[in-house]
Image (cartoon, rainbow, N blue to C red):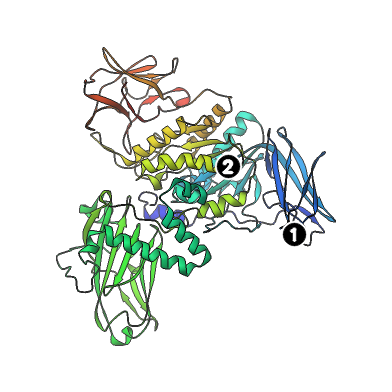
Amino acid sequence: MRSLLLTAVAAAVLATTTAVPVQAQNTEVVNTAAGPLLDAMFQDHAVLQRDRPVAVWGRAAPGASVTVAFDQVQVQAVADADGGWRTHLPSLPAGGPHVLTARSGGSTQTVADVMVGDVWLCSGQSNMEYQLRQVTNADIEINNARDEGLRLFLVGRSSKPAPSTSTAPVGQWRLTTPDSARDFSAACYFMGRDLRKAQTVPIGLIAASWGGSIIEDWLSRQTLTDLGGNQQALAALAAYARSPEDGEALWRDITLAWWKDNDPGTKQGWNGERFDDRAWAPIPAEGAWENTVPALAGFDGVVWMRNTVQVTAAQARQPATLELGPVDDVDTTWVNGRWIGGGQGWDTPRTYSLPAGTLTSGRNSIAVGVLDTNGGGGAWGPASAKRIVFADGSTVSLSSGWRHQVSAQVASLSSLPRTPWIGGSGMTTLYNGMIVPLGAYGLKGAAWYQGESNAGDAPGYSKLLPALFADWRARFENPDLEMLVVQLANYGPAVTQPTDSLWAALRESQRRTVAADPHAGLALAIDIGDRYDIHPTNKQEVGRRLALEALRLAGLSTVSSPQPVAIERGADGVHVRYAAGTALSLYGFNRPVGFELCDAEGACRFVDATLTGDQIVLPSARPSDVKVRLCWAESPICNLYGPSNLPAVPFEAPIV
């Protein structure tokens, strides 16, 4: 699954998003023929976590003693048989700059301008990856990005099927300047900037995101194993790590079995060489089907596309390549009734080899089964990108002549296993490539801005998100690691009547996970999104709300988005009670909007509401009503707010 439908412009922007290149640091290394003593995370301008022991590690000669000095503090370590060593500095107060030195034998490494403060990891998909240069008022924000007490570390994109033992740097600690901030995560930067203003202590920000990524790709193998249901994918991933050929062969069998067992079109032979598709409707060769085929607007599921091409005898004797461009999200592709490939990833171009003999002189059939799991759908790339290229350089265009037929809606299908080694849509690969290299670096907390790519499975996300909390707390050796979650923003169609909403259900999963965790905070974006653009540009407010939640968890503020503490039936209707003294207010109207009452059959209706002090009264409640919903839609209208211009949290909850 991917982020919901992106426009071609937004997709192009994301395709050009790159990390700041890792540059040589000024760290002084003396007489270390075997390389630096300190791990690559410890560089000039680094920030170490205050008020808790700080892990420091690196490599030296096997069995060698290592002395680590932090100004006047010294600690010792001994390298193991593989040369790895590790020790801890004692709890340190905020401040700096300091000098960190490691010595072993005749080797010395010195790291300068090290600060002690709070360190935050920022991670997720494209809205966290979204760069400062793309936001509202970007020129002004970039020009004002000047703060030596705010340090930035941008992790380059890296997807690995297994954790790497490489000690190469994955990023560089940099002072905040217009140059360093320009390509940094905007939401992360604004959060850090606001924390600096509120606390005046050094802040270190580590940004590690991947546009379109699913949460499963940020989890460890052990966590996914413990959650269950991932055995086939994890087995194929392990095989791929040993041998890509073996992994791909295993995965081919797994996916073909899924199509055979689940897809009605496959069962009816729509992939066959001689299948008669003349009754099928035409479909454009480019553009997502939700935008180009009115009958498929809003459709998620399997659609088959077929075409025929004429090939000369000379061309048929040659090997060739079939180019389909990107396919959203999953495809299974057949030529003359023969399976020639399949892939996953909404923005991954599909290129398949056609060995000599695959094509025949004269008519040839091409059949592509496409599974779209959310938004968009189809072979959406340029029509000119669809063609067959022969070894002699000749080509046959596939820019027209496509016909299509709907096979099944996604709701009627069992979940298709995702190719586990594809970065962003796989399993564990981003954890292996972008989290593991950070080691046990000391953190205050992590800000998580993700969920669009998992919006089709809120029940699953309810298990995955707390698993991520536990996984990262173990990885960074901090059981109290603060986890900040940006709830999904408003995006998608407005509604005139209550409806089921995948995005609303995912928001509720996020809300409940955070509410159950005393070290977690929820930053709302329900009112600062864009119903026409999945990438809203107002990241300043996202950062402000993340910072407010961080301050609340630190005991420095009590401000947070209002959530109900009780929903009760009274003589005058249903009462939605908020915490005593909550300063609720209404914007744009004298009554709250967006409240719904639902009966036991799941039928919901919009209802009038009144604000009285710290509670909302729904006077039209019926005895059959069993639950209340607020702002339950992709792009709801919400006008109930609390202090600091924070919207009330959308929710679904039973009446008691």
Q: Residue 35's mark?
A: 1
Question: Badges 2 and 1: C-beta atoms under 8 Å apart?
Answer: no
Counting from the top left corner in percent of width and height, residue 123 is at 52, 45
Residue at horizontal 37 percent and vertical 79 percent from the top: 355
Amino acid type of the residue that numbered disc 1 sits on in the rendered structure: Gly
The nearer-to-camera label among 2 and 1 is: 2
Apparent side of residue 48 relative to residue 480 in the rendered image (left or right): right
* Snapshot quadrant of residue 325: bottom left
Apparent side of residue 568 relative to residue 273 in the rendered image (left or right): right
* Snapshot quadrant of residue 398: bottom left
Q: Is residue 8 above or below residue 462?
A: below
Q: Which residue matches tag 2?
A: 474
CA–CA distance in space, label 2 to label 1: 29 Å
Q: Foreground residue, 237 or 101?
A: 237
Apparent side of residue 613 relative to residue 470 in the rendered image (left or right): left
- Residue 118 seen in render: yes
Q: Is residue 528 above or below residue 4?
A: above
Q: Is residue 347 above or below residue 467?
A: below
Q: Residues within 10 Å of mark 2 (few under 14, many from 20)?
A: some
Earlier-in-chain disc, 2 versus 1: 1
Counting from the top left corner in percent of width and height, residue 425 is at 43, 54
Residue at horizontal 70 percent and vertical 33 percent from the top: 94
Amino acid type of the residue that numbered disc 2 sits on in the rendered structure: Ala
Q: Residue 647's mark?
A: none
Q: Foreground residue, 461 or 398?
A: 461
Apparent side of residue 70 relative to residue 343 in the rendered image (left or right): right
View extreme (top): residue = 571
Counting from the top left corner in percent of width and height, residue 34 is at 76, 61
